[in-house]
Image (cartoon, grey):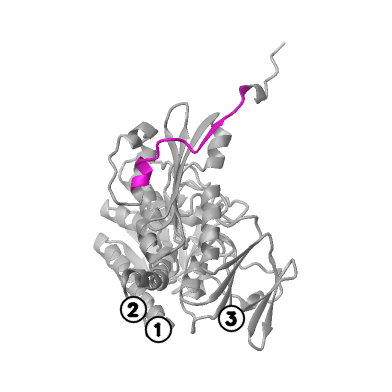
Amino acid sequence: MSEFDYDLFVIGAGSGGVRAARIAAELGARVAIAEEDQVGGTCVIRGCVPKKLLVHASEFAEAVEDSVGFGWTIDGLRFDWPTLRDHVRADVNWLSGIYIRNLEKSGAELIRSRAVIEDKHRIRLLADGRTVTTRYILVATGGWPVRGTAIPGLEHAVTSNEMFHLDRMPERLLVVGGGYIAVEFAGVFNGLGAKTTVLYRGHEILSRFDGDIRRMVHAGMAKRGVEVICGDMITAIEKTETGFVGVTLHDRRIAADTVLLAMGRRPNTAGFGLEEAGVALGKLGEIVVDAFSRSSVDNIYAVGDVTDRVNLTPVAIREGHAVAENLFGGASITLDYDCIPTAVFSQPEAGTVGLTEETALARYPSVDIYRSTFKPLHHRVAGRDERMLVKLVVDADTDRVLGFHAVGHGAGEMAQLVGIAVRMRATKADFDATMAVHPTQSEEIVTMRKPAERHRRDPAAEPKLASAS
């Protein structure tokens, strides 16, 4: 008889935790996974999946507009928010059920309770007060929206968690923030008909993205009617007879029915007994882990957003899978966090993989930029005044493609596919030797022949190290 009740106890049934639990159980481990909320985590329940469904819904408005140029008549159209909201919720519930069934098939035990670590081998389950023992612990509790406390009236605002459950569709929406969540929700509700304003304290939205992406998404949002205000920040939210007013540092007063705080997410580590068990936390509350996702306590591991490494669902899944394989499959897997493709389902959409132009210029002495901006075939007949961007960042000394960036319809799908080539260290000559698929937007990736810009760092301007005397 084992000295422990379980070989692995997972806290948090999101994408990373569920993957780790399933793989470990399939490898023969005795596994339990505890979840106090709906199974599926942020991505399935209140993030990527329902948000992408809302994006699809909002894009119909643009498609209907464009259809006129193709001969369609569009009189009598009407949108109903409760129908969309309830259908999205039904899909989320269905997907959560699939997660549960997959856990059951694997042999992992699902425990509906908050789990608190008492020491490195003991877990207390708050639902019934019992304590269980485990050889290994995996924390996969994700992140939680930042609300802040210093701004008067913040209690009147909502976060992304609540946006999927609004009783009514806002006529006026103020979004505070400039990252993924902010620009995606702004695009959604603007497309559904709300007068939408984005307020961001930085100089340009989508920090850490390539500069061309940032500027082009901003311009595309503005062209669709979203007011994007940068270099300002909210200082108060006032409740009025007709809704709310967001007051900014620069004395703007922005009327809204709903104020969405999209100022980022923090690791969800409070109240799980981590510090009491000796688990080291970083300055944002993240669990500090090594390359194998192991914390400062040798049998406690963590994956996903709770570690604040690369906060993307596919990354959490890979991390969870690796932990299970390493502990119970005899593997020694570490993840490579370079060249991770990602998409922003803004309107217009953005997709990217590899180095930005700005980062490449800082790291490499010779960089060529290939850039194509063009009006897609669809837009020409639809009469839509919008161009698409396709961009390659190339190390001119080796011809290796360092980064890919796109803005426009299908940019996310492009990033996934081009990501394979970038990760394989493909050269610009490899791209050039690939036949185009015509007529497609992605054919531009393999037909750009001449650099739009050539950057060469002057060796004479490089700082010289003092020679040893």
**What residue is at 40 percent from the left and 66 percent from the top?**
52
Mark 2 sits on what residue?
A: 73
The front one of 22 and 449 is: 449
Highlighted range, magenta: 443-459
Residue 37 position by quadrant: bottom left
Mark 1 sits on what residue?
A: 78
**What residue is at 65 percent from the left and 55 percent from the top?**
203
**What residue is at 51 percent from the left and 57 percent from the top?**
217
Residue 363 position by quadrant: top right
The tag earlier along the polypeptide, 2 or 3, is 2
Give yes or no for residue 430 being in the magenta stretch: no
Q: Quadrant of the N terminus?
A: bottom left
At label 1, the amino acid type is: Arg
Residue 96 position by quadrant: bottom left
Image depth: mark 1 or mark 2 in front: 2
Is residue 324 among what the camera can see? Answer: no
Image depth: mark 3 or mark 1 in front: 1
- The 10 Å Cα crowd at callout 1, few under 14, some 14 to 19, many 20 or more, is few
User: Mark number for residue 257?
Assistant: 3
